Amino acid sequence: MSKQLKQLGDDIWKNQVEKINSELFTLTYGSVVAQLCKDLDNNYDQVNNELYKMGYNIGVRLIDEFLQKTQLSRCTNMHETAEVVSKIGFKIFLNITPTVSHWTADNKSFGLILVENPLADFVELPNTEARKKLWYSNVLCGVLKGCLEMVQLDCDVSFLQDSLKGDENTEIRVKLNKILKDEIPAGEE
Amino acid sequence: MATSNWSILDTKYAKQVNSLIAPDFTGVSSLIARQAILKGYCPKVSVHSSPTADHVARNYGFSNFLSFLRFFEYDLADSDFCLPSDKGEPNRIVIKFVDSLEHIIETQDANKGSFQGQSAPEKPAGRFPELYGEHILTNTVSRHMDRVNNEIEKTSFYTNARSFLWNAKDLESECSEVQNSKVQDSKVQDSKVQDSKVQDSKLQDSKVQVEQMEGSIYLSMLSKATSSNTLVPFEFINHPVVNLVVITADITIRDLQAVYSDQKRKYLDLHARFPWLDTSCMMTLFLILVDTDAVEQFQALSGLQDYCVSVLGEDSIGCTFSFEKASNSDAGLPLEKIHADSLDFAAAAKLRPDSMLSVEIAKKVAKPIHSAVDTIVYKKMVPFLRRKIQKWHEEYVVPRKSLTGRLLGAGRLWGSNSSHRSFFSFGYGKEKSESSESGAGDADTTLYNAQQGYYPSASPFVFLRRLGDWYFMMRDYKNAYTVYEMLKKQYLADRAYGYLSSLQEFMIVSLLLGASCKVNPLEKATDGKRVSGITAKIVSDVIAPFLDSSFYSYLSRCSLKTYTIRLTLVTAELFLVLGQSVAYCHERLFSRYALSSEACFIESQKLFKRLIDSKLVDNVCTGVLMQRLSYIYYCNDKPGVSGSEEDNQLQRKSYYTEFNPEKLTFPPTSHFGASRSRKSILWMLLCAKTLDPVINRTQVTLVLWYIENELRQTFHLGPESTVAWPYRKGSLFVALKASLE
Amino acid sequence: MSYYFAILGTNDAPVYELEIGTYRQSGNGVPHLPNELQELEQFILNSSLDILQDNQFKDTGLFSKNLDSFYGYKILSYLTQGNGKFLIMTDLKNHDESIRQFFIEIHELYVRNLLNPFYEINQPIRSADFDTRVRALAKRYL
């Protein structure tokens, strides 16, 4: 299963995805964050929120692209979801495959460890306050949140640690709150 | 105001130069400095005055007639020495009145101990006297600096500079206000604007004044380093060419006879004591003073003049003026204010009160003296020099230069007491052995006296040297160089190092002076093409090796500190003169091989650094030298300013600078990279450090003001940006500033 | 035997400075710059910019091993394409080639630093990481 997913992810990455220069991408994101910090007077909590919202807006759209490209069917459990997110989701959009780890006993919460983070290339946080508060790549959490919500998984997504802050790893924590019922959007029968 | 005291800066010539090359805070144009050098190398007229003549001078408040006359010599410096006259020869000559020969020699002899280099007194070659006593240069400069400081502290510019340094913020807002008002100027004719404008222009005047005074410090050093009364055997620049005997017309014929023979006897004595000293080449001239109030003296005058010509065989001139200073009752008489050259007088300032730097003399008195001085120079001295030069040239130069002369006739002229002495270049071997045979050689009147270290006055090499120096004084540098060149081999063969160093020094100086006169930027272009004639090859093949060798032999072989200073300083300054002249003539075409102004500046910088590093002068002078060095760097891109305005306009129009402050500004392309203002700042800083803020507050304040101003203007740095590098703690600039507060 | 190394921004103000001693000839990396020089070093480097500017459009190379000198200390320079300047003032002789290598490596570091979105051009480089990397390079080459 896992191998198949990996194969699928690689295939899509190779054949179906349009690529852009990673530095352009990194710098674009970097300027967005830096500009946000400037505009919000270095209120890093607020910056985190903004990034999260931006990510969320991306996520709710991105899921359609994801499903159209992969043609995957519904996952059966969170383990499968985690594998898909890591081996296909991250692969086809960022060309990285985070390691899935730290499952909780109730199988509802897992960690994604990013060995490399293309968003954070070249980045060095400017001061100690930023080091304490700013989640530089918080947009990723927003994206995951948005995507998962669109497939009826209401999750809490947040960074646990970030190597930019001097932590050992960069880890995103995903915790399932509940599975939403299929709801027909209002106004459609 | 006080500026009039710095008279070399006050001449018409200086004004002409300043209008072309604006003076900067770091220094005055080298064209003015050249004037000071030329003044140092001018012909000297020794003054021997009778007691009655001195008495006349005392009536006017002077100690003797010499100091009275000296007030009239500077009138001659008012024109451009380097402008050729119609005859192709320089038309203006400046002279210097000096003490009588025997007096100079006596003081020199008495001061022997302090005048001489301390090391190696046993070496015969080291026995020449220095140009001036050990501490004289420093004393001159620091005394002059003190006086300048006093004046400067009174100016509004100085107060402003101080507040600029320490209350920078207030001033800056003021500045921006002024700027703003300038922008709106055309529409709003605010009275406030008017006020600030008036203040501005006042401040500007005050600034110009301070700049002049600053410049005079260096000039005082340069003139002291070049001018001296010291008589040495190896050069004749300081040997008086005219001996002026000043007598009053009430003298009896017998007394006149006595004065004359006394003089002759003294000269013979001198010659006996100093065999290198030749008094026979001097022209004796009587200046007979006639009192307007004593009718009988008028008749006596012509009798005395007749006697001078027919019996004594000497020339004379009369000068009629009132011996008594006009009393108060005649106060209505028009007065003429005459300034002495404070730079020359600074050395003697200890003896003279400051008020003596300028005197007011009734025009009625001043006029005849002016015209007498004119007569001495142009009617008597110049023709005399020309006559002698021509005579010696034919006697000594022509036979050596023409081939037939070399082969046949020359020997007779050379060897005066030995039949088979040849001085041809191929005759060296033989001639040298002879000179070593004659060992003690006091009987020999032409050969180098190796033990005593001089050539006797009858030696042809002395005549040639004198001829060269006279050419030099008359500013015929080409002939001077030719004559000097003929001597070089002989001096080298005789190991007459004092002679050799001085010879090489004058060769360098005549090359550079001659070249700079050819490219005089003040001269209206006549035929369009001007070539300095100095090429990089001349510098590397002639000037540089001569300089090195002279520097070494002055210092180490002869232990003549002051000569080493003169050599280096003058050469450095002359390179600057040349560089500046070339730069300001730049629109006219030069030879492709001629040295560019940048190259001249570099040579000049090298020499100034060498002088600074040599530690021959002490801190005060070193500081002044550093300021001069800074000036050379400052000069580097002048004139090149004309192009920058267009560039600025281009810049203003550019989209980038208007909308994107982060965009790198476009450098002014026309003279990009030509500026050396940062170098200039560095040396100014070193200058401030050397001058020492504790000892010399005023100067250091001004220098720091300059640096601060440059930093802000050129690099848009302000003190509010405390992180900016010059204002960082621990930097010398900040430390110096703090020590002044 | 010491080095004074400075990176100057496009506005010619220093953004990074380091005084370091040589590791060659059994040196231990401790700088021994005399005090008279230390208090002047910024001004000295600044003054050599005059020469750098003059040569900027005449020379093609980025590296200049004899830019300027000041009383036994020579100044070497490396000009980046973006008008950043690396300058070294040193009393060491005959280490031009290793200094050139050092400059090239520094150039890479410098560019990486420029790409940091939080770094603004011509601001002082305060990154500790950058500093350690530079020191490591100094140890290797200087």
Image (tube, rainbow, N blue to C red):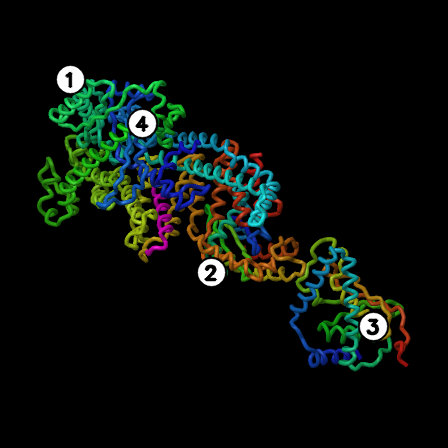
Q: Is residue B585 magenta?
A: yes
| Three-letter code, disc 2 | Phe
Q: Nearer the viewer, mark 4 or mark 3?
A: 4
Image location (x, y in percent) of residue B13: 35, 40
- Say what secondary structure mark 3 lies in: helix
The residue to which callout 2 is attached is C57
Q: Are marks 4 and 3 on the same chain?
A: no
- Marked residue chain, label 2: C
Residue nearest the observer in this picture, B524 or B397: B524
The residue to which callout 1 is attached is B254
The disc, 1 or 4, on the residue closer to the chain's N-terminal end is 1
- Marked residue chain, label 1: B
Q: Nearer the viewer, mark 3 or mark 1?
A: 1
> In whole angstroms, how far apart are the C-alphas of marks 3 and 2?
58 Å
Disc 1 to disc 4: CB gap under 8 Å: no
Q: Residues within 10 Å of mark 2 (few under 14, many from 20)?
A: few
> In whole angstroms, how far apart are the C-alphas of marks 2 and 4?
63 Å
Q: Which residues are magenta?
A: B570-589
The mark found on residue B363 in the picture is 4
The residue to which callout 3 is attached is A148
